[in-house]
Image: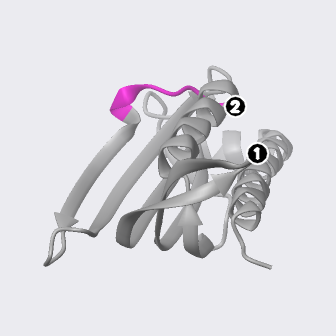
């Protein structure tokens, strides 16, 4: 298998303030279910540390979501979540009090295109990918980049909804 990275480094999103974490988590899983292929096994790491005093916690997660786009190409998007000092709070929506969480939220997004080449020898892979499939590889990288950009913009817009004017 060969990996072709789509993003140079990580795309980073950060929000400090209020967020309805449960709703955000559900929305994100649904986005991946629709755009990629969500399974509970996509959550590769989860750690929650309760801070001194017990009213806040730090949360770290890692998701790795894959989609077999064709027999030869697989999309992979990884998200690294770092949520610091998350504590329960309430917000007022349409005159009703609603549970939310406040904290420092950071998400890093990485992605790559993976080719299925384990059955081929190195010389054939070079010819196949560098000469014959070069255009198809770039086209698939562009399509995956558009998915990642869409995800990035959607998350950014969700964070903007909770900004205080």
Left or right of 80 in this view: 109? right
Question: Which residue carries the number 2 mark?
Answer: 35
Residue 134 x %, y %: 79, 47
Q: Who is closer to the viewer here, 5 or 147?
A: 147
Left or right of 51 in this view: 71? right
Report the residue at 17% width, 66% height from top: 50
Q: Are marks 1 and 2 in contact (CB under 8 Å)?
A: yes
In the picture, residue 69 is in which quadrant?
Answer: top right
Residue 29 x %, y %: 54, 35
Is disc 2 placed on a helix, strand or loop? Answer: helix
Report the residue at 43% width, 25% height from top: 39
Compared to 8, does 132 lie above or below?
above
Report the residue at 85% width, 44% height from top: 139
- Residue 115: in sight, yes or no? no
| Residue 97 inside the magenta-drawn segment | no
Q: Which residues are magenta?
A: 36-41
Is disc 1 placed on a helix, strand or loop? Answer: helix
Q: Who is closer to the viewer here, 102 or 115?
A: 102
* Residue 147: mark in rendering: 1
The dominant secondary structure in magenta is loop
Residue 74 x %, y %: 59, 34
């Amino acid at each position: 298998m060969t990996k072709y990275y789509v993003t140079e480094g990580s795309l980073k999103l950060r929000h400090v303030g209020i967020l309805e974490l449960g709703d955000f988590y559900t929305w994100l899983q649904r986005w991946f279910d629709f755009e990629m292929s969500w399974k509970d096994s996509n959550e590769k790491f989860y750690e929650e540390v309760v801070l001194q005093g017990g009213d806040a916690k730090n949360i770290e997660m890692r998701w790795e979501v894959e989609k077999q786009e064709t027999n030869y190409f697989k999309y992979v998007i990884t998200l690294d979540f770092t949520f610091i000092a998350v504590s329960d709070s309430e917000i007022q929506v349409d005159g009703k009090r609603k549970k939310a969480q406040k904290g420092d939220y950071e998400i890093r997004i990485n992605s790559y295109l993976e080719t299925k080449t384990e059955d081929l020898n190195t010389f054939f892979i070079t010819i196949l990918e560098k000469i014959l499939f070069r255009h198809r590889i770039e086209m698939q990288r562009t399509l995956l980049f558009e998915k990642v950009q869409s995800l990035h913009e959607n998350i950014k817009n969700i964070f903007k909804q909770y900004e205080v004017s």
